[in-house]
Amino acid sequence: DGTIQLNDANVHSVRIRINDVEGNTSQLSFKLKLNGRLTVAEKQSAQKMFSPNAVNVFEQNDFEAYLPEDCLFDSVQAVFSRNTNLTANSVSPQFRFCDASVPFHGKINLRLLANTVISDDLKSKIVIERKDKNDVSHQKAVWQKNGTTTGWLSAAFNDFGTYQAFADTQK
């Protein structure tokens, strides 16, 4: 998926080489060093693969994804991370699920567990935001009680990306 994980403060040399069908080659070389200033997302998933022509389900204690059997064109690595730093009006962690550049047909059904108590007057005003580097979209969340003071929030999206639930308090 193109992710580079640095686990130490050493300088690492990186070289990316690409070739086109005409035999032309381009190369980019650079050095990377972990400086500790970035927030590291908590890696949650192992190297699970999703298969085309099969129902694929991904479950964590606070995130679930259901992919219908006809939605994938090829095998996809299930990349998942969670960022628990809350932003204004957020009611869930931010979840990154798979690579948004992977083509997808149909809808992915998601469930995010609210990590804060949501008052009854706000339950109808919750939206789930999906974003990537090129696009942002929102879907009204469907509230599903969890038997506690929090609950699951569900919505369906056309693409992989980063998801987070928010209380829409704008007039």
Image (spheres, rainbow, N blue to C red):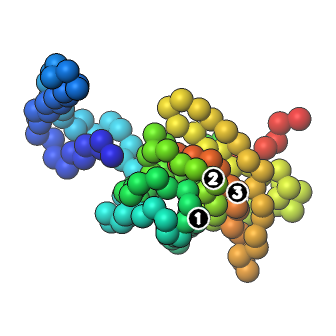
Give the tally of numbered discs.
3
Query: What kind of residue is marked 3?
Result: Ala
Residue at 45% x, 61% y: name it.
52
Could you say which is closer to the camera, residue 57 or residue 54? 54
| Proximity of marks 1 and 3: CB atoms separated by less than 8 Å | no
- Sequence order check: which comes first, mark 1 or mark 2? 1
The answer to which image quadrant residue 3 occupies is: top left
Query: What kind of residue is marked 1?
Result: Pro
* Residue linked to disc 2: 106
Furthest residue to the front? Answer: 22
- Residue 164 visible in the shown view: no
| Proximity of marks 1 and 2: CB atoms separated by less than 8 Å | yes
Query: What kind of residue is marked 2?
Result: Gly
Q: Secondary structure at mark 1?
A: loop
Q: Local crowd at mark 3 within 10 Å, few (<14), some, or many (≥20)?
A: many
Tell me if 153 is positioned left or right of 31 in this view: right
- Sequence order check: which comes first, mark 2 or mark 3? 2
**Circle 2 or circle 3, nearest the eye:** 2
Q: Secondary structure at mark 3?
A: strand
Q: How far, Cα to Cα, is label 1 from label 2?
A: 8 Å
Q: How far, Cα to Cα, is label 2 from label 3?
A: 13 Å
Could you say which is closer to the camera, residue 160 or residue 138? 160
The image position of residue 16, as x and y in percent, is 18, 30
Tell me if 12 is positioned left or right of 73 in this view: left
Residue at 20% x, 49% y: name it.
7
* Residue linked to disc 1: 68
**Circle 1 or circle 3, nearest the eye:** 1
* Residue linked to disc 3: 155
The image position of residue 66, as x and y in percent, is 58, 66
Q: How far, Cα to Cα, is label 1 from label 3?
A: 14 Å
The image position of residue 95, as x and y in percent, is 52, 53
